Image: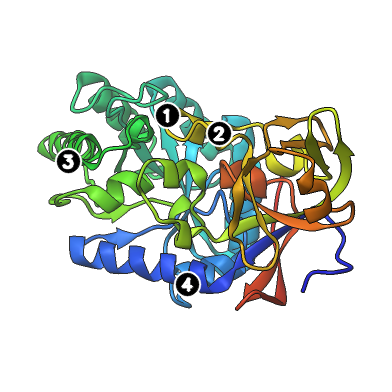
Amino acid sequence: MFEGLYTPRLLLDADRLERNAARMRARCHDLGVTLRPHLKTAKSADVARVAADGAQGPITVSTLAEAEYFAAAGWPDILYSTAIAPAKLGRAAQIQRDHGARILFVIDDRDTAVAIGAEAAALGARFGLLIEVDCGEHRSGVEPASDALLAIADAIRAASPRLELMGVMTHAGHSYAFDDPAPIRALAETERLAAVASAELLRSHDHKCPIVSVGSTPTALFAEHLAGVSEVRAGIYLFHDLAQLSRGICSEDDLAISVLATVIGHQRGGPSLILDAGALALSKDVGANRFMPDAGYGRVCDAATLEPLGELAVTTVHQEHGNVPVPDASWFARLPIGSLVRILPNHACLTCAAYPSYDVLRAGTIVDQWPRTGGW
C-alpha cells in the first residue's frame, strides 16, 4: 500500500477529516453561531475548503504567512489571533492591498492600540481590531468587563478612522486541564460570560461590538449554549490527536492525521525498534500523557489498518530517531528493518508543522497531495 514511499511523511485521512468538519459545522449551527475555523494547524487551503464545505467564510490564523497564503487563495475575512507587533503592520497592509482581504487584529493593551494607530496613519492603512479578554487561562488578554477594557476601546476610537473596534474575543485554552465533560462545560460558560459581559460593557459606552468571539475545540463541543456569542474559533477538531482522545473529546475513529515511518533499526538489548521519525517528525509535545500516560510521543499502529500494535509507543525521540520499546525479541521478526508503521501523534498542531504537504487518503489509499504553508 505505501511501499516505496519516502519517510517520514504526513498522512491525512480525508473521510475522517470530512466527518470531523461536518460535525463542528452542525454543532455551531445548533448553537446559533458562525464558525470561524482556526487554520494554524491545517495551514492548507484544501483543508480550509473542507472545513467550510467549500465556502470561503471567516477564518482564523496565527501568523502573517498564513494570512498572506489564505488571502492570496481568496479568503476575504481573516482574524490574526495573536497580538500584533506594530513593526509587522506594513506587511499586513500590503496583504490587504494586494488581495482585497481584511485582516482583523487582536490587542490587549492601550499602549499597543496607540502604537498601532500611529503606524496605521503612517502607512495610510486601516485595520479592524478585537480586544482580547482573559477568561482564566492567563496567557494574554485584559480583565473582562474592566476599566482597562474601556481604555483600550477609547484608544481605538481616538485613532479612527485608521482603527475600528470590531469586537471582543477570548480563548479558554485551560479547558485542556480536564478529561471530564462537566468542568469543560462549566469553563465554556465562564468563557462565554467573559466575552458577553465585555461586549455589553463596551456597548453601554457607545462602542460598537459586532463580533463576540470565543473558542477552543473542547468548549465548542461541550458548551450548553452560547447566548450573546457571535462566532466560535476552533481548529484541532479537523484532525484531532491523542491529546484530544485522552480528554474524551473525540474517538479513535476521529483521528485523521498519522505519520508514516520506517523501521530502521533493532536494539536487541532493549529490546526496541528504531524508527526514522524522531523529534522533528513527531514533535516533543507530550500533552496527551497527563491523561494517557502510555501515549509517549505517539502510538505505533499498523501501516495498512491503523490498528494499534499492542501498547507500542514512541517513548524516546532524538532529532531523527524514534525509539519504540517492544515486549520481546519476537517483534523483530514481526517488524523487520524496512517495515512501515504509522504513528498517531500526541499533538497534531506541532507534528504537522514539520511537513510541506499532506498525502491524502481515501479508504487507506493515497489519492492526492495537498500543499501546506509554513513559517511566519
Q: Mark 4: which amino acid?
A: Glu
Label 4: state its secondary structure.
Answer: helix
Q: In front: mark 4 or mark 3?
A: 4
Q: Residue at x 64, y 74 (%)?
A: 364
Tally of numbered discs: 4
Describe residue 126's horizontal placement relative to residue 297 as left or right. left
**Alpha-carbon distance for marks 1 and 4?**
39 Å
Q: In front: mark 2 or mark 3?
A: 3
Q: Is mark 1 in CB contact (under 8 Å) with mark 2?
A: no
Residue 272 position in % (x across, y down): 78, 36
Q: Is mark 3 in CB contact (under 8 Å) with mark 1?
A: no
Q: In front: mark 2 or mark 4?
A: 4
Q: Mark 3: which amino acid?
A: Val
Residue 375 position in % (x across, y down): 71, 44
Q: Pointer 3: what residue?
A: 196
Q: Earlier in the sequence, mark 4 or mark 3?
A: 4
Describe residue 111's horizontal placement relative to residue 100 as left or right. left
Q: Residues within 10 Å of mark 4 (few under 14, many from 20)?
A: some
Q: Residues within 10 Å of mark 3 (few under 14, many from 20)?
A: many
Front position in the image: 7 or 224: 7
Q: Quadrant of the N terminus?
A: bottom right
Label annotation for residue 119:
2
Q: Pointer 4: what residue?
A: 18
Q: Residues within 10 Å of mark 2 (few under 14, many from 20)?
A: some
Q: Quadrant of residue 328?
A: top right
Q: Earlier in the sequence, mark 2 or mark 4?
A: 4
**Alpha-carbon distance for marks 2 and 3?**
30 Å
Judge whether 298 appears above or below 286 on screen.
below
Q: Residue at x 48, y 41 (%)?
A: 243
Q: Residue at x 84, y 28 (%)?
A: 269
Q: Mark 2: which amino acid?
A: Glu
